[in-house]
Amino acid sequence: MYAPNPSGDSACARGDAARRDRPALHLLSAFGSNEDPADDGFMGAWSLDGAAEVVVAPRALDGSICLQGRGWVLCAPRSRYRGEDRTKVHLAHDGRAALAFRGYLLEPPLHHFSPPEALLEYWQDKAPADRRRNGVFARASVDLVRNRLVLSTDAFGFSPLYYRVCEEHVLFATRADLLLLPDTESDPIAMASVLANGFIVGDRSLHRGIQRVPYGREIHFDCTPTPRTRAWFCFDDLPAAETPLDDDAVTRVENALCRAMDRCRALDYGPWFLPFSSGHDSRRILGALLDAELRFDAATVRFPQKGHLDLDAHFACAMASHFRFPHRVLELRAPADYAEDDAIRRARTSAETPMHTWAVTLMRAAGPEATALLDGFLGDVLGNPGYRLPGLYAEPSRDIARVADMVATIPHRRYLSPALDVAEAIRQEVIDYLRPLADRRNVAEFAFDLLRQRRATALWSQQLVPAQHLVLCPFLDLDYMCAAISIRPEDRHARPLQRECLQRFHPALASFPGSRAVPPGIRPSAAHLSRALEQACVRRMWQDTPRDARRSAWRRDTSPAGRCLLSLSRMRPELVWRWEWVVQPALEVLGHTARLAPVWRRDA
């Protein structure tokens, strides 16, 4: 689709003659075909002065849709919503403004398939910057009259949105790899961080110059490459952690969850689907569903955990049988097919985390129709301490230093090149990132949320979900967060809040064992399967990485010991399973950056 911007509307426009003198930006590829079960999100480009052109290659639109005007473009994958082929999924345009939106808002209830006029009205420029925005979302707004771009995400930034400044243009996308140019280089601090911790510190990506939009902020680009940042959410808005964990507090927390579920229900998106583990997060959501007598489907992936093959699935089946709700157990595919699924997971998460390798199996089971997935994300962290370190909560500045020391530890640094020996840089990045929280006693919980949870745990549901589905996170409701955060952290450390709520309001659910506390007498039985899956993934990573790119990446990023270990993993993967914690993350991160192709190109 082409939607022209009326001439003269742009405050910084230079006219047609100037446009011909400016280098153009070319979009080479976008989201791929409808057969890809994991494609979701949006991407786009915007000219800083309205004069630099954006050219979309015809092949870039296979399986995608596009809104385009003078100096800007928005793209998203095609999808279907309630039997209708939506040609504006995630996108809206009225001649004066263009919008890309992914996710949902609870007040008022809006989601990325809501009527375009409702979304445009909500995000109009005159809306107060400090308005409460309760939900999980990523948004890019183009003001076609004043030539302004605004990027923002939810209060805690769990919905990913990335951006980069490329001379005359700003590029943005819900995946970092969708912003690649031919000359993009790797970011050593981000690479070392994800290899050490399974997540990237701060707002970095694996690529230099590509940043993640900060939590609770709006980034405004006008006519210059330096953006203005405006905060619409502040941690000072949250209550102090001074409430004792007593019966009244537990009741307030449970009531807040019920209200959050009611708000999710008001979205009226589609049938509800519960990814059900044996943990407390999904149990509490299950209890709310059963109490409200709501219809839903549930599924559990049978996946090796702690050396066991059948922990979550075993206990989930027992609860499904007892409470009589619809439930399926999803089996992993054969190792070679599983490795193919894992390649999809790596690509869609930009290799930013090695976690949740079972996610593609779950997403495939969600089906082709628009469905609301209920994710228990962050429930345990709000209900229990994220870091179980003795002596926490006495002095926030000391807690920040301890977390920074932990994150900066690179246990396998001997396998990495000196260029990735950046422990002190990681430590300082964490300290700077958490400095705005230095006055809060529960800074350790927020550190866990904003570092590990935001940058690793959330990615499976935010970047692997098919485009027709919507992931709802009841525990991220702002009222629920206020109720949970207000409880003293030392109380939640001694008596996990999730368990207290279950025992008080759902004692039958609380009585079942689970994967977090495996009953005695159950012996590990899946070590052989774990090795087979790991070896299949290692073979697939080697297969997917071109030889020349592989050699240059290994020389740049690994030490001689690391190169020997990686070479051995290619020739005899069964011999290096004891070093899987080194080999697989290294292949995932280093190999991913080596095999990427550019998505955008500038004129010479």
Image (cartoon, rainbow, N blue to C red):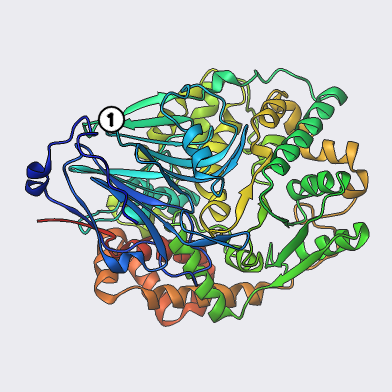
Q: Position of residue 289 (x, y in %)?
A: 82, 47
Q: Position of residue 483 (x, y in %)?
A: 72, 26
Q: Is residue 401 left or right of residue 210?
A: right
Q: Is residue 346 left or right of residue 421?
A: right
SS for dot 1: loop
Task: Relative to 492, say whether 413 is above or below.
Answer: below
* Residue at image coords 29%, 30%: 227
Q: Is residue 50 left or right of residue 238?
A: left
Q: Which residue is mark 1?
A: 146
Front residue of this view, candidates 310 and 568: 310
Q: Position of residue 497 (x, y in %)?
A: 77, 35
Task: Relative to 114, say whether 501 is above or below.
Answer: above
Q: Position of residue 542 (x, y in %)?
A: 39, 75
Q: Is residue 490 left or right of residue 62?
A: right
Q: Quadrant of residue 166?
A: top left
* Quadrant in which the N terminus appears: bottom left
Residue 160 visible at all: yes
Task: Relative to 315, say whether 495 is above or below.
Answer: above
* Residue at image coords 52%, 74%: 339
Q: Amino acid at mark 1?
A: Arg
